[in-house]
Image (spheres, grey):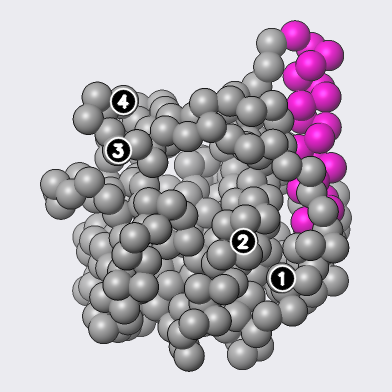
Amino acid sequence: MLIDTHGHVNFNAFRDDSNAVLKRALESNTWVVMPGTQYSTSKRAVEMAEGFESGVYAAVGLHPIHLGEQRKVDVLEVQSLPLDQNKQSWEEFVTRSEEFDVEKYRELTKSKKTVAIGEFGLDYYYRPKGKVKLEAFKAKQKDVFLQQLDLAEEARLPVILHCRVAHDDMIGMLEARAKKMQGVVHCFTGTVEQAQKFMALGLYIGFNGLILKDVPALPKPEEVISSIPLERIVLETDSPYLIPPMLGVERNEPLFVKYIAEEIARIKKVSVEEIAEATTQNAKTLFLSGS
């Protein structure tokens, strides 16, 4: 059994076949946690998860990319990957600015299928020019970040954290709370030292198809993964994005999380079965211990 702890089957890329994609995963003994990135996708994740008796779950949260002005975003660019001239239309989108309405998100936490607050966090990639604008940009993200941490604490739910070009700021804010966290740093792109600091705060580290790609600007995945105990790792796809390159397909899906398990097994020099057993238990401990 495997658990994809971060598959966006609630996104428009799966609009026409989301049920089929989820059923395909479940038939292959793969469970899925679907994070939202704004209210609409969070609500959709909850509604979709409620359509399945088990194996499909939701997380609700507001991604920092939706806090600023509307802008066109290329998903491949956001992930520091080379642009593909043949990319699908859903790989490029216009962000919709949203103010964090805690009451609306609080209501979504009442579903038994909501297992986390996320994804939310800090993202300094599309930062504005000018010191005043930059400080206001960071301040807004930090404010909403803290509000969602508070909601998670109130709802007694773990967090799914997005962190891009902001690891030290996030670590500092979490350390300032002076309490252990329950959650995961999704799509980890930080250093070995930063991973150690996140784990000291109680967090798990999530890996996806990015570990199968050569991205010179990022720390080497093998060095980071080798440094992290298996009991602190969870698997994810970030589908529909970050497709394992050997597949030659146009859209990622939760079923492909097995390729992440295989790569981590290669790096750790253990069997895929050991990776599957450990990461599944980690995911259950993190997201389903209260179920």
Q: Magenta stretch containing residue 135, yes or no?
A: yes
As displayed, is residue 17 above or below residue 65? below
Q: Secondary structure at mark 2?
A: helix
User: Quadrant location of residue 214?
Assistant: top left
Disc 3 marks which residue? Answer: 88
Disc 4 marks which residue? Answer: 83
Q: Are marks 4 and 3 in contact (CB under 8 Å)?
A: no
Q: Secondary structure at mark 1?
A: helix
- CA distance for labels 2 and 4: 28 Å
Q: Is residue 279 visible?
A: no
- Determine whether, in the image, residue 7 is placed left or right of residue 171: left
Q: Residue furthest top?
A: 130
Quadrant for the N terminus in the image: bottom left
Dot 4, how many residues are within 10 Å of its Cα: few (below 14), some (14-19), or many (20+)? few
Viewer-nearest residue: 282 or 79? 79
Residue 266, x across and y down, in percent = 22, 60
- Determine whether, in the image, residue 266 is placed left or right of residue 21: left
Kind of residue sitting beneath label 1: Leu
As displayed, is residue 76 above or below residue 2? above
Specify which label sits upstream in the sequence, 4 or 3.
4
Magenta residues (range):
130-149
- Determine whether, in the image, residue 50 is placed left or right of residue 134: left
Q: Are marks 1 and 2 in contact (CB under 8 Å)?
A: yes
Disc 1 marks which residue? Answer: 108
Q: Secondary structure at mark 3?
A: loop
Tell me, for residue 42, which label it has, or none.
2
Residue plotted at (43% across, 52% down): 12
